Amino acid sequence: MIATATLTQRKTLSSSEIFRLNLSNINIICFQLKPDIEQDEAISLSFHLSRILPHIVVIWDKPYFYALGKFKNSMQEFGIEWESILGQIAGEGIKDFSDRTLQFEEVPLTKTVSANVISLLAYQVLKTSKPYPFSSITALSKNGVQVRREAKFWAEPIEIHGTLQPAITLTIKSKFLSTKTLADFYLNHSEKNNPEKLLIDLNVRSLSGDIQGNGTITQLIKEPSLIDKQKLIEQAKNEISKKALQDELSNKLLVAVKFGKGKKLYKYGMAALRPCVTSETASRFGVNWGELLKETKIPYKKRTELLATYKEEAENALNNYGFELGLSINSRHYPELFWQPQVPIENTPLLFGNGVIGAQSKILTGLSRGGIYRRHNKFSDPSRPIRITVTNLCDVGLDDFIKQLKERLKSYKFESLFVTKSYR
């Protein structure tokens, strides 16, 4: 992922958002569990182990688990009874592990830990550190909806000189978020009498941070039984979730949330969640999606400043475990990793119809002079129209725009059929 490209007198300097990692900490153990478990279960278990164990993170890299302790402590000093910890997770009622007994078996480390393992361990440190290491910056706040800049990161081992090196990607993502809890949003909305329409497919995130990232409401549980609620309260991992399951609203309605690509559903009281805004759901919040979208564009100078801040915050968390975060991969130190075209992209010659050649930066001129080079098979019949849907996200008229676009396509010998949808 290329983050910046700075023009110098001689050439362009390109910089990525991939940062090399060095781990000086040898405080690592490797283990496996019997019976074997599936990949999704292993990744979930490693997260829960990292959540429960202070000063230790755990990851899974098939077929083994790896545990890394903080730099100043040896793993033996922690005195961990692994099977007892596994029993604790099962005792929490986590569905994947509540009905089984897992046996811990340490595996001697006979070779250097792989780049992938080191990268995953760094990722797990950043994901499960408490408090969460990264700051959140509000770029816009309007009608109870915010546009926030937040750090996004993942394990990213990279091949350098034929050898895979540990690294992580650290970048910036703008997110849309309501300042209200889901309970407040629901109770004060004009369509609260139709909860399916209002809540289903709404993006949310946990207020407690027990699960990072956004989830989607997929089901509603109306008037849950006292037995089911009590079981959920006992399984809740934090006071925010427990309190939300005990308020008056939770007696009438709970929501089931799916996070990421996993199949598991997590049941919440609505006071434990915060709704997030998407293009599909913006109208439910009474905000203009186009206006929010403009705020996602981060100027170069601001992006550079934010990346520097997030890198420093990442280093503060990673240093506790013996990680050193290097400079980002850039074309000055690793020129072989960056491809530079001999001809600037905007000057790349393109072949249009009737043998006309034009620059990439003047595509419309080339089309006007020569037409298209070749029609797609689907449109080999000139009378078949291109079907176009125009989504109106802003309070502006579209008639002139559609007319001009239709005329432009016609000049290229394409018929068009427009359907307009308005979200004003």
Image (cartoon, grey):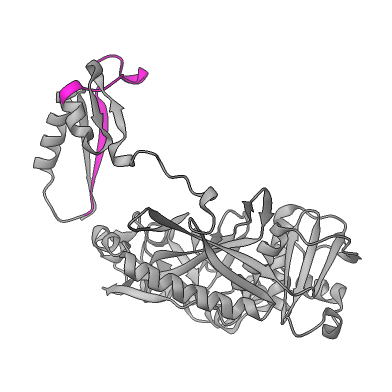
Q: Residue furthest top?
A: 381
Residue visible at 68% across and 78% down? 234
Res. 142 in view: yes
Q: Residue furthest front?
A: 10
Does 237 sit left or right of 345 as displayed? right
Residue visible at 70% across and 60% down? 43
Q: Quadrant of residue 28?
A: bottom right
Q: Quadrant of residue 9?
A: bottom left
Does 182 sit left or right of 81 as displayed? left
Q: Quadrant of residue 81?
A: bottom right
Residue 31, percent across and down? Answer: 85, 64
Does 406 sit left or right of 287 as displayed? left
**Does the magenta-highlighted stretch encompass residue 225?**
no
The quarter of the rendered structure image containing the C terminus is bottom left
Q: Residue furthest left?
A: 400
Residue 140 or 24: which is nearer the viewer? Answer: 24
Residue 83, percent across and down? Answer: 87, 72
Residue visible at 34% across and 70% down? 302
Report how many numbered discs are placed on residues in the image: 0
Residue 327, percent across and down? Answer: 54, 67
**Does the magenta-highlighted stretch encompass residue 374?**
yes
The part of the chain drawn in magenta is: 369-393
255 lies above or below 403: below
Res. 211 in view: no
357 lies above or below 167: above
Residue 375, percent across and down? Answer: 30, 19
Does 315 sit left or right of 117 as displayed? left
